[in-house]
Image: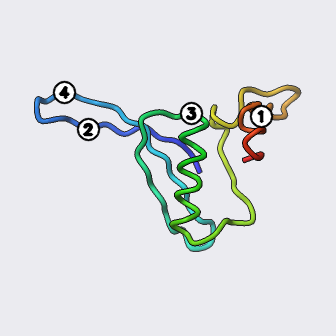
């Protein structure tokens, strides 16, 4: 799973950017995509629950990139998890 940013042009020709959450199952490559207003931990958790409902279950392992919602940095080459993320159940 990861966040991305997509752009769209409204009817007045103004360009807008919006976050998009994407989760892809490893074996089937089945994709879940959800557009959001922000890339925060609450949006992440909501999107994950929605993806799990879409898939009809929870995968044994969820892999992430070093997305800022999950990892706030690194120390000695190891990721430091966001405290809010750990409180939310160790995504």
User: Which residue is more in the foreground, 11 or 79?
Assistant: 11
**Number of the front mark, 3 or 4:** 3
Q: SS for tag 3?
A: loop
Decide if residue 11 is on the left or right side of residue 30.
left
Q: Tell me the distance, in whole angstroms, between the alpha carbons under discs 2 and 4.
A: 8 Å
Q: Do the residues labelled 2 and 4 touch (CB within 8 Å)?
A: no
**Earlier residue among tags 3 and 2:** 2
**Circle 3 residues within 10 Å: few <14, some 14–19, many ≥20:** few
Residue 81 image label: 1
Q: Tell me the distance, in whole angstroms, between the alpha carbons under discs 3 and 1.
A: 14 Å
According to the picture, the residue beneath numbered tag 2 turns out to be 8
In the figure, residue 14 lies in which quadrant? top left
x, y percent for residue 34: 43, 51
x, y percent for residue 25: 59, 65
Snapshot colouring = rainbow
Q: SS for tag 1?
A: strand
**Earlier residue among tags 3 and 4:** 4
According to the picture, the residue beneath numbered tag 3 turns out to be 40
Q: SS for tag 2?
A: strand
In the rendered image of this protein, does residue 23 appear above or below residue 76?
A: below
In the rendered image of this protein, does residue 53 appear above or below residue 89?
A: below
Determine the residue positioned at 77% across, 30% down.
83
According to the picture, the residue beneath numbered tag 4 turns out to be 14
């Amino acid at each position: 799973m990861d966040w991305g940013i997509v752009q769209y042009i409204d009817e007045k020709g103004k360009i807008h950017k919006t976050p998009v959450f994407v989760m892809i199952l490893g074996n089937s490559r089945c994709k879940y995509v959800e557009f959001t207003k922000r890339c925060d931990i609450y949006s992440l958790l909501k999107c994950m629950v929605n993806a799990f409902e879409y898939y009809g279950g929870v995968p044994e392992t969820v892999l992430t990139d070093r997305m800022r919602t999950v990892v706030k940095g690194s120390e000695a080459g190891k990721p430091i998890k966001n405290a809010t993320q750990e409180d939310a159940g160790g995504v």
